[in-house]
Image (spheres, rainbow, N blue to C red):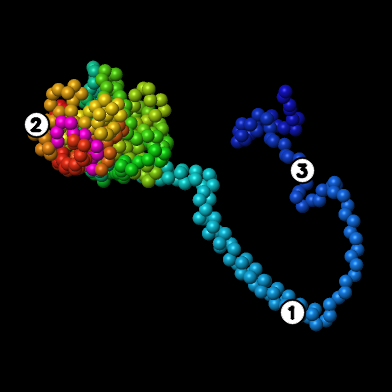
Amino acid sequence: MTTSDPNRSTDRDPTEAVEVQRYGPTPPPDAAPGWQQAPAWTSRPARIIHAAPPRRGLGAAPLIAIAVAAGILSGAFSAIAVSNLVREPASAIAEASTVPGADNASNVRVIESSAVIDAVAAVTPAVVTIQRSGGGLLGGGSGTGSGFIYAADGWILTNRHVVEDADELTVVLNDGRQFPGEIYGVDTLTDLAIVKIDANDLPAAPIGSSADLEPGQLAVAIGNPLGYENTVTTGVVSGLGRQIQASDATQSSAETLRNLIQTDAAINPGNSGGPLVNSAGKVIGVNTAVNADAQGLGFSIPIDVAKPIMQQALDGDPLTRPWIGVYYVPVSPALAAEEDLPVEYGALIGTTTGSGQAIFPGSPAEDAGLQVGDIIVSVDGKQITADNELSTLILPHAPGDTITLRVLRDNSTREVDVTLGELPAGS
């Protein structure tokens, strides 16, 4: 049923809420008696008050003594009351400020919004658009992606798939300036690349750490998806140590990306290579490609994985990755039960077929005395798990670094120091 108000104008105020425009203003509530008002009637029976018999009064002396004592007590109580009134507001304020959860939801939203705004302001000037032309099948490798400046003299971190096979790169800065870009190097183990432009005094993004990330903390993705520059999406760190199968644009090849940060911050085509930022305005990851089945999920490469190659570029060294020189099988509860292993986690040195060389001759593993059948259970005190495999834990290191492995051999535990080598070409 519809109703109409003859006194209401048919012209709608566009500033009103849609409910008000359609149904009209909400009628005022009926007046109700205030709490000060007495009830109009009562169901209580009337009380009959009987007159008390007269009492004999006290003498004058006792009355005077009682009056004096009452005066003294009254003065003392008044002084205490005044003192309490003076102190009460301060103590109440202190108590409110120390009670957990005293801030209301509105204050929490303001704090979160302010953190996002500050984080975006700190990083956005360093975010760039990378335009690729040529390359690919029949010259169809053109496209755009994102990246960010990590050193003021023109060093840019991005995804390998953003720049790979390009004939020409154009880097567009946040302020609109354009520079030709040169691929300094690509990472052989992850979807990362370093691009260099000839410029100085550029805004550089603050670099954070991904070592202590926790699910639930704020995550902000910045990039240039679908041609929309400086797009900001927010979410949380949804998971750590994720693994996905990523395909190239032609769907002709795929690679496994490991140890990724999972986030629900929207990451779309064109976001690739852009930064994932924490609430402190520091880069914690590099947004990368996702598979088509990952609805509503984004994935980023942890920034600690990228730091070694970032530093190698600054030092003028070729991009290399660390290498132990072993084949290993991840230990699982099923494998432990099948092989009667003493632990249900770690990396068992050996091959899945039991044949072939599990330890490369002249490798760091051989130099350190590792043997087939050893189970590596931790790297520098970090336990090897299904989400943190041996290769994942050594990836943030550079060739020449020394790491400490905890190894189980013949049901005894030993600490083994290994100086990492350089991953051979083509490995």
Q: Is residue 229 left or right of residue 254?
A: right
Q: Is residue 33 something that shows in the picture?
A: yes
Q: Residues within 10 Å of mark 1 (few under 14, many from 20)?
A: few
Residue highlighted by disc 3: 31
x and y, in percent, of residue 390 in the image = 23, 34
**Label 2 Cα neighbours within 10 Å, binned few <14 / some 14-19 / many ≥20:** few
Q: Earlier in the sequence, mark 1 or mark 3?
A: 3
Please report the residue visible at 68 percent of the width from the left and 30 percent of the height from the top: 23
Tell me if I can see residue 184 in this picture. no
Give SS at disc 3: loop
Q: Which residue is mark 2?
A: 361
As for residue 397 lying within the magenta part, the answer is: no
Which quarter of the figure has residue 157? top left
- Kind of residue sitting beneath label 3: Ala
The quadrant of the image that shows the N terminus is top right
Rendering coords of residue 101 (x, y %): 51, 48
- Position in image of residue 229 (x %, y %): 37, 33
Is residue 225 left or right of 32 when viewed as pictured? left
The residue wearing badge 1 is 68
- Amino acid type at circle 1 is Val
Check residue 374 for magenta coloring.
yes
Residue at 18% over, 25% down: 351
Quadrant housing the C terminus: top left
**Is label 2 in contact with label 1 (beta carbons under 8 Å)?**
no
Q: Position of residue 71 (x, y in %)?
A: 72, 76
Q: CA distance from mark 2 to mark 3?
A: 92 Å
Work out whether mark 2 precedes mark 3 in sequence or the reverse, and give the earlier one. 3
Start and end of the magenta stretch?
A: 370-380
Q: Is residue 72 above or below residue 406?
A: below
